[in-house]
Image (cartoon, rainbow, N blue to C red):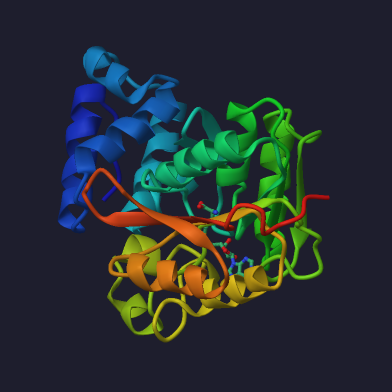
Amino acid sequence: MAIQPSSVAAVRRQAISLLHQVGNETPAYDVNVLLGKVLRLKPAEVMLRQEDDLSSQQLEAFDQAIRRRVQHEPVAYITGTKGFRRIDVLVNSSVLVPRPETELLVQVTLDLWDEVGPCLVVDVGTGSGAVGLALAEERPTLHVLGTDVSNSALDVAAQNAKRLSLLDRARFSRTSGFAGIEISGALVTANLPYIPSGEISELPPDILEWEPRKALDGGVDGLVVIRSVVSQLEHSNAVGAIFEVGVNQSAPVARLLVDAGFSATSIHYDLSGYSRVVAALRPAGSISRV
Ligand SMILES: C[S@@+](CC[C@H](N)C(=O)[O-])C[C@H]1O[C@@H](n2cnc3c(N)ncnc32)[C@H](O)[C@@H]1O
């Protein structure tokens, strides 16, 4: 059903009802974001403009946006951007939409970077570049190298680095993990796919039908990609590593890191109380910096 011409209040009501009918769990929020985009307002400001009328172009743009959202396309793919830490990143269907819980990975990485002293950060599985670029934006001397197996994701990451004027401190490379890259003395940070393959089909349609499978699928037990990167770490001179993990994965990932020669592992909890990030450092004196 198309949105009929009317005031902000009326189109808002119609759109919320349309999204509600397809099982959307955050219809009012989504509608405020999409209306805000069309009206060039912040989502909260939409509520203050309820009496305004939409122009025919605005109505057409909003109608298109709601049609896309009814098909479960993520809001961030429709608006084209997502806020993350202090930056806005461009996103499209080649990259995972950066999640609020991943902001914790950035914080733990910044804290470790401050502790170990200036070093390169390797953002493995960089996707949109959100993690690495947020790190570089928050520490003006931090250099980051983002890797990914997806060329189209790396294109998005490079565009984001350019938009954020971070090209002098952010570079990207297509490789698995950090194969072929010298990372002595570096910190490795990673939000890799960690959903067990058997659970992918149970994901909500917004994720299942729209986000790239290779950003989600962590193999049979969810840890296949993380395990392969830890095995690269074992044979590297990285100073430390920080991984975002899924539910019930923090203990096994901490164990993998200890087995790979790291110590001082710490587990960090997100705002919902889930153990979400595992960090590990090499024992003091066990690495040589280059
Ligand atoms: C969960 S997404 C995270 C994207 C981004 N770091 C973020 O937090 O928004 C995982 C990313 O890892 C990439 N990836 C999957 N396997 C990989 C591998 N073996 N080596 C490097 N990147 C990989 C995917 O293409 C995807 O972009």
Query: Which of the two residues, 74 or 259, is positioned nearer the viewer here?
Result: 259
Q: Is residue 134 visible?
A: no
Point out residue 248 in the picture as x, y percentages from the top left corner: 28, 69
- Residue 147 falls in image quadrant: bottom right
Residue drawn at x 62%, y 44% is 132
Q: Is residue 238 visible?
A: yes
- With 120 as the anchor, is 139 left or right in this view? left
Up the image or down, 24 lies above or below 252; here it is above
Point out residue 221 in the picture as x, y percentages from the top left corner: 39, 83
- Residue 47 falls in image quadrant: top left
- Residue 163 falls in image quadrant: top right
Residue drawn at x 35%, y 33% is 33
> How many marks overall?
0
Query: Which of the two residues, 115 or 159, is positioned nearer the viewer here?
Result: 115
Toward the front, the furthest residue is 285
Point out residue 290 in the picture as x, y percentages from the top left corner: 83, 50
Residue drawn at x 16%, y 55% is 21
Point out residue 44 in the picture as x, y percentages from the top left corner: 28, 21
Residue drawn at x 24%, y 40% is 15
Up the image or down, 222 lies above or below 95; here it is below
- With 42 as the anchor, is 133 left or right in this view? right
